[in-house]
Image (cartoon, rainbow, N blue to C red):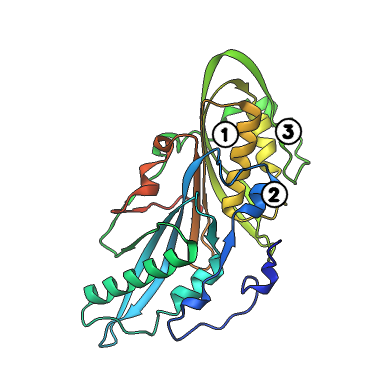
Amino acid sequence: MQLDLNKTALGKTSATPDKYDASLLFRIPRSENRMRYGIDDYKLPFTGVDVWNCYEVSFLTAFGLPVSRVMKLIYPCESQFLVESKSLKLYLNSFNMERFGKSVSEAEKSVLQIIERDLGLLLETEITVILFDEKSNEQIAFSDIKDSQLIDQIPAEILESMQFDHFLESPELLKGIRTNEIHQYAFQTDLLRSNCRVTNQPDWGDLFVRISSNYEIDSSSVLTYLVSFRKENHFHEEVVEMIYKRFSDIFKPEKLMVAAMYTRRGGIDINPVRASHKELIDEAFLSRICRLAKSLRQ
């Protein structure tokens, strides 16, 4: 049965809750979009995680002292569900005027346990929740390819003559020549743009790709393909999985990693990563002791 997102809080005006309320949380099955693109939920072609940075987490101590934190939420792509972003925002806001614990540390511990419990029950999977304060360290992801812009890998004379007129996802744009040797590619681009499935508001992301394949990949074709997402309506996680599946189907890679770091909306940014091998997932995504450092757009 197709999920009717118009029956959720997404895209609707919602009052800020003043009481803790776990019922505000809403989950979305991953299977609907995966079925459309030939991704088998029970035999995924990738592993990975979704990392959420939530910048507006606040609650009170028993004496009414406000506590402000940044929350890092990590859960696996193998889970059947993802949490809907506006519902998470409203849920986190429901802590704002509630009191937890006599000290800051006691209040923080109580809130952390509640969030872990509620999201674990919602998503039916193992989750990781960390609350960071202003003293916490951050870790930069993909530091080795931050200067490897896709657009710079295309000769200027070719780039200047390229025509971009596909703005719905078009995998036929991807081109490569099969060879007898393995080619290594690593790049990032800030040209990824898609739209929310319900509100049609634009979502901007920095995309990061590592691929090892015996195809000699035409970088200009990759650029035109990524531009073709410009009018697509999908959640962030879906976009990353679609790109991963197309690259996998067309270039038959030995190794592949696709990640996106999306811009903040409503105090939350979402950062999905999918990889053929777990070791390709940048440690900054998985770290329990460091915040995931923001990209330029974030």
| Label 2 residue SS | loop
Residue type, label 1: Leu
Question: Which one is closest to the eye, mark 2 or mark 3?
Answer: 3
* Classed neighbour count for the residue bearing mark 2: other residues with Cα under 10 Å, few (<14), some (14–19), many (≥20): many
Residue at 49% x, 52% y is 271
From mark 2 to mark 1, how far is it between C-alphas? Answer: 17 Å
295 to the left or right of 253:
left
Looking at the rendered structure, the kind of residue marked 3 is Leu
Q: On residue 230, which mark appears?
A: 2
Q: Which mark is residue 265?
A: none
Label 2 vs 3, first from the N-terminus: 3
Give the CA separation, mark 2 to mark 3.
14 Å
Q: Nearer the viewer, mark 1 or mark 3?
A: 3
Q: Position of residue 3 (x, y in %)?
A: 68, 64
Q: Residue at x 29, y 74 (%)?
A: 110
Question: Quick one: label 1 or label 3, which is nearer the N terminus?
Answer: 1
Locate residue 170 relative to residue 78 in the image: left or right: right
Contact check, label 2 and label 1, Cβ < 8 Å: no
- The circle on residue 173 is 3
Look at mark 1 in the image and give the residue it sits on. Answer: 150
Residue 17 percent across, percent down from the top left: 49, 83
Q: Residues within 10 Å of mark 3 (few under 14, many from 20)?
A: some
Q: Quadrant of residue 132?
A: bottom left
